[in-house]
Amino acid sequence: MTQEQLIRQALSALAHFGVREVCVAAGARNAPLIAALLTSKGIRIWNFFEERSAAFFALGRMMADRKPVAVVTTSGTAAAECLPAVIEAHYQGLPLFVLTADRPKSYRGSGAPQAIEQHHLFGVYAQTLGDWDVTDESLSMYQTTGDRPRHLNVCLDEPLETNVIGVDFSRAQTPEAEPRSHTCTLDCDLVLASGMHPADAKEAAQLLATLGAPIVAEATSNLHGFRELQPLLTPGGERSLQSARPAHVLRLGAVPSWRWWRDLESQPKIKVTNITHSGFSGLARKENVQTLPWESVRGSQFVVRGSECGILRFEPDLGKFEQSEPNWMRKLIEVIPAGSRVFLGNSLPIRELNLALKSARPGVEFFASRGANGIDGLVSTFLGVSATHREECWLIVGDLSTLYDLAAPWIIAQMNHPKLRIVVINNGGGKIFSRVNSLRALSEKSLTVIENRHELSFEPWAQLWGMEYVRTDDVNDLVDLLHVPIVIEIRPDPLQTEAFWKDWQRPVIRPR
């Protein structure tokens, strides 16, 4: 087996699985793969200087376009940098393809530079396609199934062959997905919806309009723009759910951010049916929980159990606390133009924007990373989601999430996207922790550490990457923004924010 054959076979594997976009982070060991990609046809290449941002950008591309995207890394810890994005893709059910270059197999266990055990590097989070070396007599791929991350490890020895002619990705034969169907009849009296692609939301809307059950939907469900669902959409989010007494909950899409959902763990008498692409139930308990494939939306029949749920509707008075974080979400959503794409950070921005959805303009699409629900790589993922969307694209994210991903804007120069708006809600640390009941008894000293309190400004970060910068306490500053990438820093009033949540989270008293 020659190195040239090995490289061409690896690129052919990418093409076979439908990859048409590749994020590369160059190094010496993967230089032959990158050189061959640059001579290939039918492939778009995004160039990164580090692997972590590359992998999360690829994740965003898949979230938006729902097509496989590959990341190509060099050997050693560079390959390991992809693990957080691989985990997120695993829990979202997205086909991220990681092609890692490696030193020859004979170096494993030696401690030689850039020689780690890369085979099965991602464990349960990626399906292994192969571990190829020039010493192999033939190259075969392990069988893999479904929309999950895949990992192919290619061992390359020196001298490295950098004159390999690439492949034509556009002519590759990709396996046709087997048609799947699932039909059943289920009864339910409450619908929860979260984390659906706009195309999935369109499918789900048809089912939900026929079903007629009350719907509590997060912004990321993308259901709020359907006129036929307006009578069913129940405002109030967590507060409304506190009043609900369902017998059977139908969950569509990703795992919701509501605490009420987590509390279903201790209520085994409430049946839960999940319909999701990921295949994960989002609950640890097994009793009265079932998870169905997304195809069930098209083929199943659901029967409403009448008015047994008894859910109440609550409209938040956001304007009562003018400079609070939730009211800032209302202000932001009012200035975001129709047709924009909005990416929300975990998890406080999602919860707060859910309360302001009434102000959203037509055609606004919402995205969020609701797989592992972490704050890794959110800026990079937003940029991937935005890359081919020509309307305005907005990221609304917390300060710590931004600090996690300071290298992300590297790719902006290659995107040629003049309407990127990165809104950083800077509250001086992770304020979500101050609302976790089990942490309320912590000392002030402990909270200072846990919340990672700081006094940082994001103006130098914007300057580093050549972005415009605005710090504002007046939403009018965000009207008619320049057609250039902009960092918008907002510092809500912490006392007003605390007052809002104290008022909003008071116990629900059901009418007699």
Image: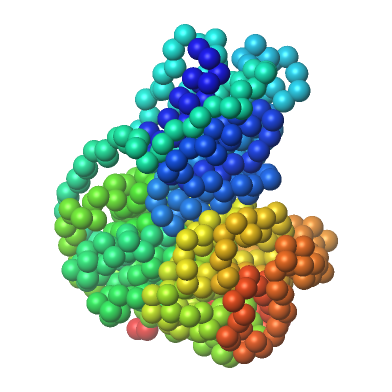
The front one of 101 and 235 is: 101
Q: What residue appears at the point 24 percent right and 38 percent down from the top-left corner?
A: 178
Q: Position of residue 508 (x, y in %)?
A: 46, 77
Q: Position of residue 467 (x, y in %)?
A: 70, 69
Q: What residue appears at the point 77 percent right and 62 percent down from the top-left corner?
A: 464
Left or right: 66 in relation to 345: left
Left or right: 297 in relation to 127: left
Whether residue 198 can be seen here: yes
Left or right: 75 in relation to 60: right
Identify whether 246 is placed above or below 362.
above
Left or right: 308 in relation to 235: left
The front one of 57 and 109 is: 57
Identify whether 332 is placed above or below 70.
below
Q: Position of residue 224 (x, y in %)?
A: 36, 74
The front one of 291 and 362 is: 362
Location of the C terminus by quadrant is bottom left
Identify whether 313 is placed above or below 442.
below
